[in-house]
Amino acid sequence: MKKIALVITRMVKGGASRIVRSLIHGGKGQFDFTLYSGPQDISENELDDLKSCCNIKIIPSLVREISPFKDLNAYFNLRREFRNSHFDVVHTHTSKAGLVGRIAAASAKVGTLIHTPHGTIYSSGSMIEGVPRLGIGKYPLLLAERFAGRKQNYLTVLSRNEYDVCVGLGLSSSGNTVIVPNGIETGNFNFDSAFRLKNRAGLNLSESDLLILSS
């Protein structure tokens, strides 16, 4: 059974953590997962659903904001973990965990390294709290991302736009960048006709009215 490490800065509610959960639940029994996460904003019992599926290790120094001392500490902690556990694959998620985790995994000589940024901070108009806008303020981060990108085997992105940005800025190559859109569990929408009509009536909709949902 292949051993896979998943690394993320914060397992807070959102798209990135939802994908990590899907990977673990979908691959349980087929892969031996270990989840590495920072402690920020993780509520009590937040990870209870994963405890039977994988090993969970909290890295106190793995934080979202830029912090040279903590970032270096997180790097050494992850490198030691990767070396001792002999993972077949390290899959990093989000920008900060991806930067520290990819460099640590490469130093530990992990065989396969995958990174998923879950949206890039380098897209035009990107405005993320704590991240400088495009220009000289973001240039050091860009250089660091290019360096980390040379260590990965694959970069998975959510859209063609993100693909174009990452390849265009030299964060990855066309040969190792794969578009993997977010999926949904279609089984959650297999309602019987009685349930469908009852809920449409509650919304004052007829059977033929067009209904569009968004989340």
Image (tube, rainbow, N blue to C red):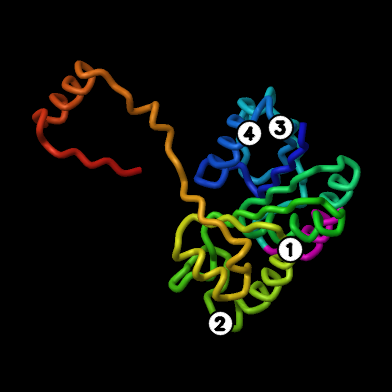
| Disc marking residue 135 | 2
Q: Main secondary structure of the magenta part?
A: helix
Front of the two marks 3 and 4: 3
**Residue 63 falls inside the magenta stretch:** no
Q: Quadrant of the C terminus?
A: top left
Q: CA distance from mark 2 to mark 1?
A: 21 Å
User: What residue is rendered at 70% in x and 58% in y?
Assistant: 153
Front of the two marks 1 and 4: 4
Front of the two marks 1 and 3: 3
Q: Position of residue 184 (x, y in %)?
A: 42, 38
Tag 1 residue:
67
Front of the two marks 2 and 1: 2
Report the number of numbered marks.
4
| Disc marking residue 31 | 3
Dot 4: what SS?
helix
Tag 4 residue:
24
